[in-house]
Image (tube, coloured by chain):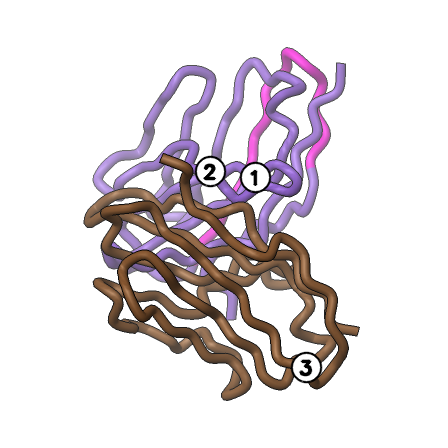
Chain colours: A purple, B brown
Amino acid sequence: DQQVKQNSPSLSVQEGRISILNCDYTNSMFDYFLWYKKYPAEGPTFLISISSIKDKNEDGRFTVFLNKSAKHLSLHIVPSQPGDSAVYFCAANSRADKLIFGTGTRLQVFP
Amino acid sequence: DAGVIQSPRHEVTEMGQEVTLRCKPISGHDYLFWYRQTMMRGLELLIYFNNNVPIDDSGMPEDRFSAKMPNASFSTLKIQPSEPRDSAVYFCASAGVGETQYFGPGTRLLVL
């Protein structure tokens, strides 16, 4: 039973446009959400996070939005760059130490 | 700091053989995590340790899997006997208290 779901396995976006990656969760006890980015042959690296007391967190070109009533969060990348091409994992937790990850979305940014 | 170190980076073995994956966490981190990545299930947490003590092993698929952390700088994940369905990328990650997790480069395991 997937508690964190990323229903789009892949996404293709033109350079300079906005990339929107989506994530849904089922456990209302989750109170902290993260996005990780993974390049081929490397481990995931932390990108951005949001606490459940907020609905938006922004860091440069990256913004995460949280809709608690819909149990949905999204990652916006604008403008998208070819270097953003990677697999993006959504993660959530209800404890300080244990994360539940989604299945990932492969983003391809083309020129 | 060299980050989280995993070895080997690639492992090819035959069904029934024992496989041992190794991890050296970032110095000073209190938590160590073992994950498995597959296309169908994404990143699954197998087990994690706090101060070398296993806290939650509910993600370990079955008794063929075992993990140890004999000291703060070393952990192993062992599969015995290995099966083709164990083929995946295995990641180790470490974290300080209240900090985000840092992942190693992973071990790509292929069981024939």
Q: Which residues are magenta?
A: A11-25
Which residue does the image show at 62% across and 52% down from the upper left? B9
Cα gap from disc 2 to disc 3, whole angstroms: 32 Å
Please, what is the three-letter code of the amino acid marked with disc 1? Lys
Give the prevailing secondary structure in the magenta stretch.
strand
Ranked by sequence position, the earlier of labels 1 and 2 is 1
Percent x, y for residue B56? 32, 73
Which residue does the image show at 45% across and 64% down from the upper left? B45
Which residue does the image show at 31% across and 70% down from the upper left? B70
The kind of secondary structure element at disc 2 is: strand
Tag 2 residue:
A45
Question: Foreground residue, A26 or B105?
Answer: B105
Cα gap from disc 1 to disc 2, whole angstroms: 6 Å
From the viewer's perspective, tell me whether residue B45 is left or right of residue A69: right
Please, what is the three-letter code of the amino acid marked with disc 3? Gln
From the viewer's perspective, tell me whether residue A72 is left or right of residue A79: left
- Whether residues under marks 1 and 2 lie with C-beta atoms below 8 angstroms apart, the answer is yes
Q: Chain of mark 3?
A: B
